[in-house]
């Protein structure tokens, strides 16, 4: 792999990492901008929505003006958008920056695919590199984002992308010069039989992506907001998913049938997500096995479906654009469907947790009048902390000085914390199960491809 | 499939029809450029036709694919099944039905008895209103919470008062049945609860110690009247008085709810007390 190919792969990884890199920063953004869960979910939605809408037009643009020039301009726009995000002082500017990032990213990613095809002279190898770069980017995204959020700030996630995007664009200089000197616009892509977008594969990609995106979003929120893990701790936990995905790619290499690979992947993904929806305890250890299944599954299904969508079709950029469009439309679909469900469930479970917490207070040995006071303080804390899973320790301040009473109060607080974790876990349960359903629904288009070339 | 693998492998797996191999597709003994898997290449010394080896490899891979599919289904079902069997999905403990009877453990002291009395009363009131004991308890913490609670459920002040009264009566019944309250005190408490205003009922919920240590002053004016009666009975027993109801006059006046003065009410209450005490 030469420098230019490495830079192209880096650019693809950088852009597609942005779909997930910000996931671990969402709770921090949520707190800093005092927004709602629905509001903060738009930091993900807007990026994926713009990417979905612009990927195919961007591919045509890349063909018309040259993939090198397009990719270079795309990376410059992406860097500009990243800068806006990093300097944003409110949710509005942050969302605007994310939209600009996605617009630039769409052009850069499809331009990179076209350049890779011309560099390798081999469609399949180019596609494999392109898909792999995106997968690695998405894989290391959450961990890197979590690390930066905790060690520096959430803004650093975006600011660090500015120089990386610029550096990734430098090796494109020769292509830019060459295309500026002489660029022959290729013939328009004809929507003839065998060259139309592969509908079943793209549909399956959308459904699978819906479940994957929602999963990353939900796991992270559950770990940080529900179980009160730090971003680094959460990053360590969710890194299991990409590591399993890398292991899954080795399994995928051993299976020839794209359809079997895709079906196995969709089933494993759905199985992992269903298990996340059925967690019997709020325990980090229990989150690991479902992530392993989901990670292996997503690796199998994404590579198989992308390969199916691009195989034998030209141009690579246009059909690659369709896969990007399908995947990110799926992400948007997943987030739009699951966020309100999850938010509603959080409200329901918050009431249930409040009842369970009050029961602990009522059944405790403290004085009845103290119970009434404590109940009132707990209700106030819950109401003041809005959408989030509440931290109820302020309701216990000041703690009694008498050691016996203090122990009683500490036991109450610990009991309530346990109930809150259970409630937070339950709040995510339905959304995980619906995500699993998306994965299973992908089996329909995968099955429909029997008579096609999948 | 890796782009570097032999090109004679059928794209859709060994079980699918394929096109004829083009000349360039046929495997050779040379390791293709960039191929990191030399074992995929059939050795030149091979004594078997390359087509046979390729087909066998493809069939092997196709079979492996089926096994991966079966394993995916089994592992997915197994993990979900294990989590379900372990009690998933987890959720917060459910609030107990306030209408269910709560066993009174044998209270060891006044404080414990008062605790159980308050819980029984909250259960009874919540059952009457059809809400959880926990929600009701939070609602009576202050006036704003109470108003919010009534607005949320469409209750009136009178509904809440009636429910609290029913709850306190249930608590008295439970305490009497558990032997924590004598029949006399229980009857007196019921009488007091019948005329108690809301604030006094909430006060009783928060502090019922008085009932269990024989000081009925915590029950308000009627409590004072009952204290006068029990004092009179004690006097009767010790021979210091002949009329156990002699100290009742002022106490009964105080026991009446605000705005309910009059001889008729006083007489009715006095009669109730006399009925209660018996001959």
Image: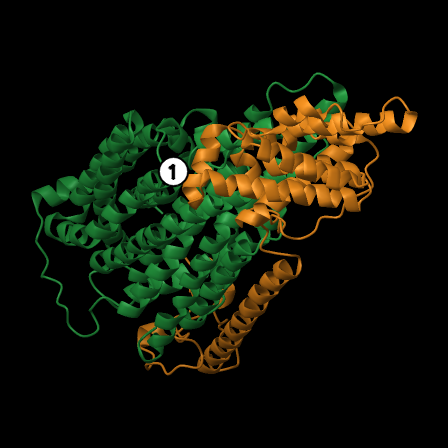
* Quarter the N terminus of chain B occupies: bottom left
- In this rendering, would A441 be left or right of A186? right
Residue B230, above or below B42: above
Residue sitting at x 32%, y 51%? A336
Q: Which chain is green?
A: A
The picture places residue B233, in percent across and down from the top left corner, at: 83, 30
The picture places residue A155, in percent across and down from the top left corner, at: 35, 27
- Within the image, what quadrant is residue B212 found in? top right
Residue B31 is at least partly visible in this image: no
Residue A152, above or below A73: above
Q: Mark 1 highlights which residue?
A: A22
Q: Which chain is orange?
A: B
The secondary element bearing badge 1 is classed as: loop
- Within the image, what quadrant is residue A20 found in? top left
Residue sitting at x 36%, y 29%? A34
Residue B65 is at least partly visible in this image: yes
Pointer 1: residues within 10 angstroms few (<14), some, or many (20+)?
many
The picture places residue B143, in percent across and down from the top left corner, at: 48, 29
Q: Of residues B208 and A7, which is closer to you in this image? A: B208
- Within the image, what quadrant is residue A124 found in? bottom left
Q: Chain of mark 1?
A: A
Residue sitting at x 68%, y 26%? B218
């Amino acid at each position: 792999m030469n420098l230019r190919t490495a830079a192209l792969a880096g650019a693809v990884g950088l852009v597609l990492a942005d779909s997930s890199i910000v996931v671990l920063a969402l709770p921090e953004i949520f707190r800093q901008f005092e927004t709602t869960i629905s509001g903060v979910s738009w930091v993900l939605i807007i990026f994926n929505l713009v990417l979905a809408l612009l990927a195919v037009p961007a591919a045509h643009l890349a063909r018309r003006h040259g993939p090198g020039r397009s990719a270079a301009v795309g990376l410059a726009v992406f860097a500009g958008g990243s800068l806006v995000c990093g300097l944003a002082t409110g949710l509005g500017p942050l969302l605007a920056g994310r939209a600009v990032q996605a617009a630039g990213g769409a052009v850069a990613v499809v331009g990179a695919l076209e350049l890779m095809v011309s560099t390798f002279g081999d469609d399949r190898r180019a596609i494999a590199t392109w898909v792999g770069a995106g997968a690695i980017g998405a894989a290391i995204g959450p961990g890197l984002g979590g690390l930066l959020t905790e060690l520096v700030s959430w803004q650093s996630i975006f600011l660090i992308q500015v120089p990386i995007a610029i550096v990734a664009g430098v090796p494109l200089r020769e292509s830019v010069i060459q295309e500026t000197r002489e660029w022959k616009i290729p013939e328009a892509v004809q929507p003839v039989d065998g060259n139309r977008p592969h509908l079943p594969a793209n549909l399956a990609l959308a459904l699978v992506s819906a479940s994957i995106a929602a999963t990353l979003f939900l796991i992270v929120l559950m770990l940080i907001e529900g179980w009160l893990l730090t971003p680094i701790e959460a990053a360590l936990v969710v890194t299991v998913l990409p590591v399993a995905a890398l292991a899954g790619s080795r399994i995928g290499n051993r299976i020839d049938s794209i359809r079997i690979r895709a079906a196995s992947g969709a089933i494993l993904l759905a199985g992992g997500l269903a298990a996340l929806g059925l967690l019997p305890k709020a325990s980090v250890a229990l989150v690991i096995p479902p992530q392993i299944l989901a990670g292996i599954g997503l690796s199998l299904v994404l590579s198989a479906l992308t390969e199916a969508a691009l195989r034998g079709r030209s141009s690579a950029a246009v059909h690659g654009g369709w896969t990007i469009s399908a995947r990110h439309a799926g992400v948007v679909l997943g987030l739009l469907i699951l966020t309100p469900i999850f938010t509603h469930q959080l409200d329901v479970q918050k009431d249930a947790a409040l009842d369970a917490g009050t029961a602990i207070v009522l059944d405790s040995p403290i004085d009845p009048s103290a119970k009434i006071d404590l109940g009132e303080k707990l209700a106030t804390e819950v109401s003041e902390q809005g959408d989030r899973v509440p931290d109820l320790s302020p309701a216990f301040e000041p703690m009694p000085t008498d050691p016996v009473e203090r122990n009683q109060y500490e036991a109450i607080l610990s009991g309530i914390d346990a109930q809150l974790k259970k409630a937070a876990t339950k709040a995510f349960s339905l959304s995980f199960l619906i995500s699993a359903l998306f994965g299973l629904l992908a089996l329909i288009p995968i099955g429909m491809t029997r008579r096609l070339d999948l | 499939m890796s782009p570097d693998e032999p090109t004679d492998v059928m794209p859709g797996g060994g079980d699918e029809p394929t096109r004829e191999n083009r000349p360039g597709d046929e495997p050779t003994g040379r390791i293709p450029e960039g191929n990191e898997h030399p074992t995929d290449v059939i050795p030149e010394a091979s004594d078997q036709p390359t087509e046979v080896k390729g087909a066998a490899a493809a069939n092997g891979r196709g079979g492996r694919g089926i096994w991966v599919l079966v394993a995916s289904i089994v592992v997915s079902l197994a993990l979900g099944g294990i989590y379900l069997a372990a009690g998933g999905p987890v959720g917060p403990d459910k609030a107990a039905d306030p209408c269910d009877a709560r066993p009174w453990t044998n209270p060891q002291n006044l404080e414990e008895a008062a605790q159980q009395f308050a819980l029984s009363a909250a259960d009874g009131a919540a059952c009457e209103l059809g809400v959880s004991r926990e929600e009701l308890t939070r609602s009576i913490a202050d006036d704003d919470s109470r108003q919010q609670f009534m607005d949320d459920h469409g209750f009136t002040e009178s509904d809440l008062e009636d429910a609290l009264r029913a709850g306190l009566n249930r608590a008295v019944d439970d305490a009497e049945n558990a032997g924590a309250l004598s029949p006399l005190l229980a009857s007196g408490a019921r009488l007091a609860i019948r005329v108690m205003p809301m604030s006094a009922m909430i006060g009783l919920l928060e502090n019922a110690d008085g009932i269990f240590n024989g000081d009925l002053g915590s029950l308000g004016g009627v409590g004072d009247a009952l204290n006068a009666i029990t004092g009179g009975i004690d006097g009767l027993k010790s021979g210091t008085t002949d009329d156990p109801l002699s100290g009742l006059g002022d106490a009964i006046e105080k026991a009446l709810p605000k705005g309910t003065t009059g001889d008729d009410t006083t007489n009715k209450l006095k009669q109730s007390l006399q009925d209660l005490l018996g001959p």
